[in-house]
């Protein structure tokens, strides 16, 4: 089974699941998003957002493929590009961080580590671009029946972020803000990545972000 990551572009945007392809929850402010969904074409609004963000800031998403099939994606951007980021009770996102807007793995591929692979790909990209951290709003009640069904589907569960290394920086009973520091990734060397890729088979170097300590070390210091 081969797995690879690619950047989100206007071409690969079409590989997002259809509900996500037409969702502008993050890309527009609440009022504009509601208006677009009621009377406009949210798919065009999302395409316009991706186009503008790519031109002005650069890569803003990753897609994972398994044996050539779209299996999951993440989207991320500076909070200034994400109007919805100011609508949470735990806003604002820290000035030194990019916002991981959403993460989704297709149900058929769940449980295989794709979520971690996607987040590691984002971390590698942002580290190269000088970003200090990733922050995200998590849903502590993800999947529970309530009146916020759309928000439930667009905000990833808190447990997911905790499982891939995020820590809570601002608690909230529903939408805590979490953070993943990227400073430990700055010292990675390409030869280490290559060695790990060989060990992990077909996984892309973009998935290899976890530091490896020398075998001869007698003690380590956790940052």
Image: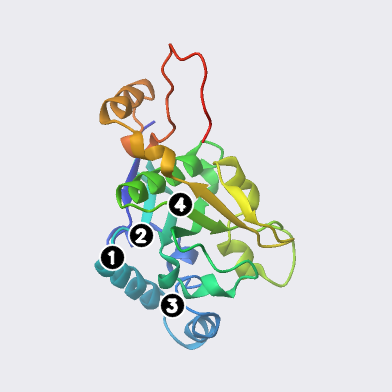
The answer to which of 207 and 6 lies nearer the viewer is 207
Q: Percent position (x, y) of residue 127?
A: 35, 47
Question: Which residue was labeled with disc 4?
Answer: 133
Q: Which of marks 3 and 4 is in front?
A: 4
**Residue 134 located left or right of residue 196:** right
- Label 4 residue SS: strand
Specify which label sits upstream in the sequence, 3 or 4. 3
Q: Which residue is drawn at 29% across and 70% down?
A: 51
> Taking the image as drawn, is residue 204 in sight?
no
Bin the neighbour count of mark 1 within 10 Å (Cα to Cα): few under 14, some 14-19, many 20 and up: some
Q: Residue at x 69, y 56 (%)?
A: 140
- Label 1 residue SS: helix
> Taking the image as drawn, is residue 189 in sight?
yes
Q: Percent position (x, y) of residue 199?
A: 37, 20
Q: Which of marks 1 and 3 is in front?
A: 1
Query: Number of labelled discs?
Result: 4
Pointers 3 and 2 in contact (C-beta within 8 Å) = no
Pointers 2 and 1 in contact (C-beta within 8 Å) = yes
- Label 3 residue SS: helix
Q: Quadrant of the N terminus?
A: top left
Please say if 19 is above or below 124.
Answer: below
Specify which label sits upstream in the sequence, 3 or 2. 3
Q: Which mark identifies residue 42?
A: 3
Please say if 24 is above or below 105.
Answer: below
Question: Which residue was labeled with disc 1?
Answer: 54
Q: Quadrant of residue 201?
A: top left
Question: Which residue was labeled with disc 2?
Answer: 60
Distance Cα–Cα, label 3 vs label 4: 30 Å
Q: Percent position (x, y) of residue 17?
A: 45, 59
Q: Which of marks 4 and 2 is in front?
A: 4
């Amino acid at each position: 089974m081969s797995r690879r990551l690619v950047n989100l572009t206007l071409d690969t945007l079409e590989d997002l699941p259809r509900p996500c392809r037409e969702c502008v929850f993050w890309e527009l402010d609440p009022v504009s998003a509601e208006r677009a969904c009621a009377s406009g074409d949210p798919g065009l609004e999302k395409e316009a957002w991706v186009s503008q963000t790519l031109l002005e800031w650069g890569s803003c998403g990753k897609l994972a493929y398994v044996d050539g099939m779209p299996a999951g994606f993440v989207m991320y951007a500076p909070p200034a590009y994400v109007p919805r980021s100011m609508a949470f009770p735990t806003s604002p996102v820290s000035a030194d961080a990019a916002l991981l807007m959403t993460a989704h793995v297709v149900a058929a591929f769940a449980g295989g580590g794709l979520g971690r692979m996607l987040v590691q790909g984002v971390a590698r990209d942002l580290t190269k671009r000088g970003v200090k951290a990733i922050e995200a709003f998590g849903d502590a009640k993800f999947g529970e029946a309530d009146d916020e069904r759309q928000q439930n589907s667009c905000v990833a569960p808190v447990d997911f972020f905790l499982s891939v290394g995020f820590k809570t920086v601002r608690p909230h009973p529903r939408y805590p803000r979490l953070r993943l520091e990227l400073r430990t990734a700055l010292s990675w060397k390409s030869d280490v990545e290559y060695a790990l890729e060989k060990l992990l088979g077909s996984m892309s170097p973009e998935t290899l972000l976890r530091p490896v300590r020398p075998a001869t070390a007698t003690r380590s210091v956790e940052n």
